[in-house]
Amino acid sequence: MIKDGYKFAAGPLVVGIISVVFHWNWIGGVLIFLGLFVMFFFRDPQRTPPPDPETIVSPADGRVMEVVEEPLNGKPGRRISVFLSIFDVHVNRSPVAGRITAIEYRTGKFYAAMRGRASAENEQNSFHIQSDHGEVVFKQIAGWIARRIICWKAVGDSVMRGERVGMIRFGSRTDIWLPEGVEIQVRPGQHVAGGTSILARWK
């Protein structure tokens, strides 16, 4: 579990247990449930990426919402969007091995993460990763519930495929932009797991 989970879960659990001791069972039960849910939300399972180095893995758990043609800075490519519900693991992982050449944080709106305009207008943090095959960009995007984007890496860091790079608290979205020359392996509606599910493959 992510260490922040202990901080957020401790309060409801302690107050809940005290409430039960004083026979305020209904309040205590709700608070204990809330504390346990927070611990569930901050879980951080071990993930092993597929052995094929030509694969590009999902940066997050969730459901694929879109696979669309979208240029980036004039370069043709495609964007894959993954929606994370509050029940998904919210630790984000690098989709490829390489070096982080830029991290761009941008303030913005807090539209529901399922809405298409969230990709362009919501608060977000973008990682630019230079891999052996080319540049890959993925974004941590805040949603209506998620109001906190956490980044654990810095510009210049080298990352492995599937390595933890940050998280988003309580419901959100991740986008990944891939250049031409990749073969997409997923479709909208498909559920993916961060660090293990293959989104695409370098040709």
Image (tube, rainbow, N blue to C red):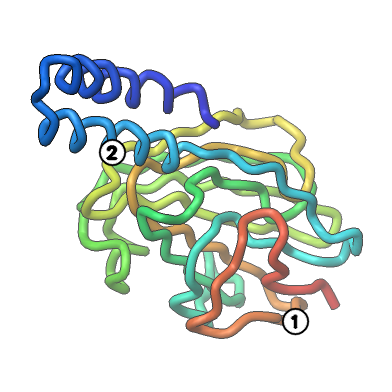
Q: Position of residue 176 (x, y in %)?
A: 56, 63
Q: Secondary structure at mark 2?
A: helix
Q: Position of residue 81 (x, y in %)?
A: 48, 69
Q: Residue at x 63, y 47 (%)?
A: 93
- Residue 124: assigned label: none
Q: Residue at x 21, y 60 (%)?
A: 111
Task: Characterize the local packing of mark 1: few (<14), some (14-19) or many (20 or more) Cα atoms within 10 angstroms.
Answer: some
The answer to whether the residues at label 1 and label 2 have Cβ atoms under 8 Å apart is no
The image quarter in which residue 116 lies: bottom left
Q: Is residue 150 shown above or below 96?
A: above
Q: Position of residue 23 (x, y in %)?
A: 11, 22
Q: Is residue 179 shown above or below 158?
A: below
Three-letter amino acid code at disc 2?
Phe
Q: Residue at x 15, y 20 (%)?
A: 19
Q: CA distance from mark 1 to mark 2?
A: 43 Å
Q: Quadrant of the C terminus?
A: bottom right
- Residue 33: assigned label: 2
Q: Is residue 24 shown above or below 33?
A: above
Q: Quadrant of the N terminus?
A: top right
The image quarter in which residue 196 lies: bottom right
Name the residue nearer the viewer: 50 or 19.
19
Q: Residue at x 33, y 24 (%)?
A: 8
Name the residue nearer the viewer: 11 or 95.
11
Three-letter amino acid code at disc 1?
Glu
Circle 1 sits on which residue? 183
Q: Nearer the viewer, mark 1 or mark 2?
A: 2
Q: Position of residue 160 (x, y in %)?
A: 79, 43
Q: Secondary structure at mark 1?
A: strand
Total number of numbered discs in the rendering: 2
Nearer-N-terminus badge (1/2): 2
